[in-house]
Amino acid sequence: MATYKEIFGTNIEVLASDPANSVQGQVWYNSTDNVVKGAAATTAGAWATGNDMNTGRAAVGSAGTYDTALGFGGYAPSSFRSLTESYNGTNWTEVADLNTARGFLGGAGTQTAALAFGGNTPPTTGATESWNGSSWTEVADLNTGRYEVGGAGTTNTAALAFGGNPSQTVTESWNGSAWTEVSDLNSGRQSLVGNGPNTNLVAFGGATPGPGTQVTLTESWNGSSWTEVNDLNTARRDAANCIGTDSTSALCAGGATPAYIANVEEWDGTSWTETTDLSRSSGRANQGATGTTAAALVFGGVGPAYAATTEEWTGAGSPLTVTFTDS
C-alpha cells in the first residue's frame, strides 16, 4: 500500500495545534489531540443567530455588508419608524434617525454612505435621504413616489429604484443629485427585491395587487434595460435581500406566499437552487443588499410577530477543519 509521502511527495506535518491559516487540502497530525486533521470547505451554506436589533420592526430599509450594516425606518407595531441602527458584526447601535419616518422603503449604499428612498409614511412618499455615516440629509425626491419599492446600488451616489406599489414598472436611476427615469421593468410589481451595483443586477419576486398574487419573476438589468431570466422556484413577496456582487449571484431569503416562509434560494446567474432555510419563517425583513452569497445578513421582519432577530449567512466553500478517523 502506497504511503502518503509516496502519493503526495511530502510527509504529514506534526503540529502541537491546528494551523491558523491552513490551505484547503492540507493535512497534519495534531500531537496534542493525537489525531490526523485536514483543511476542507463546507459544501452547503448555513445560517447562524446573531444579536438582536434594539427595536424589532418589519419593512426596514438597509445597506452595507454582513459585518457593517445599516438598518433604517420600518414599521412596528401600528406606527412607522425613523430609527436607524448600525451593525458592527456583533452588536446593533442606535444612530441618527431618518428625517421622515416611513416603512416599505428602498435602500442602497454602505454603512457610511447610504441612500433611503420612497416608502409609506403614510401617505406614499418619494422622499430621498442621503447618509454620510453620522446623519441623514434630504435630497431630491423620486419622480414617482411609491412604497414596496425595489432598490439597489453600492453607494449613495449611484442607485436604482424599480417597481413599487401599485404594481409599477417604473425604474429610476440616481446619480448623486437627481433621479432620472430609465427603461421600465417588463412586468410591473411591488414588494420585490434586487441586488448589487446599479448597472448590473437582478430583481426578483414581488406581487401584483390583490391577495395571493405572489410571483416567481426574475429580471436582469444591464445598466440600460431589463431582460426576463429564469424564475424563482417559489413565488413570494417581501423577501429579504442578501445579495451577491452582480447579476450572476443572489440570495433570496424568506418572504410571504402569502404565508410567511423560511425558504431560501440561491441564484448563480442562470437558475435558482433551493438551499439552507432560515431558522424562522419571516417576511418583510431588511429591504436592501447586506452582503454577498458568501456572507450575508437578514434582520427584522414579521412572521407573524414583529422581530428584532438577526441571522448571519455563511455560504458554501467556507474553511472547515476535519478530523480523520479509521472508520
Image (cartoon, rainbow, N blue to C red):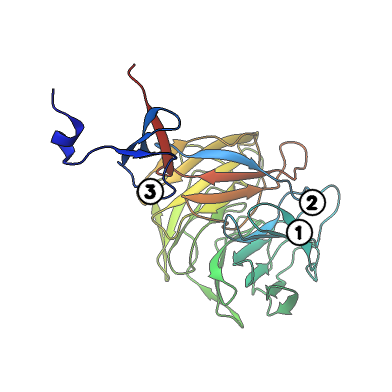
Residue occupied by mark 1:
93
Res 22 visible: yes
Residue 205 x/y as whole percent: 53, 47
Q: Secondary structure at mark 1?
A: strand
User: Marks 1 and 3: which is nearer the front?
Assistant: 1
Disc on the earlier residue, 2 or 3 = 2
Give yes or no for contact between labels 2 and 1 (Cβ–Cβ under 8 Å): yes
Quarter of the figure with the N terminus: top left
Residue designated by label 2: 54
- Is 50 drawn above or below residue 186 in the view shown? above
Q: Residue at x 67, y 47 (%)?
A: 284
Task: Identify the element where label 3 is drawn.
Answer: loop
Q: Earlier in the sequence, mark 1 or mark 3?
A: 1
Q: CA distance from mark 2 to mark 1?
A: 7 Å
Horizontally, residue 95 falls left or right of residue 44, namely right
User: Residue 68: x percent and y percent?
Assistant: 61, 60
Kindly identify the residue that appears in the image at 59 percent across and 39 percent down.
48
Question: Which residue type does callout 1 highlight?
Answer: Thr
Give the quarter of the figure containing the C terminus. top left
Helix, strand or loop under label 2? loop
Residue at far top of view: 327
Contact flag, marks 1 and 3 (Cβ < 8 Å) = no
| Viewer-closest of 177 and 180 | 177
> Horizontally, is 197 left or right of 85 in the view?
left
- 10 Å neighbourhood of mark 1: few (<14), some, or many (≥20)? few
Q: Is residue 46 left or right of residue 18?
A: right
| Residue at 50%, 37% in the rendered image | 234
Image quadrant in which you'd find residue 212:
top right
Eye-nearest disc, 2 or 3: 2
Under mark 2, the amino acid is Asn
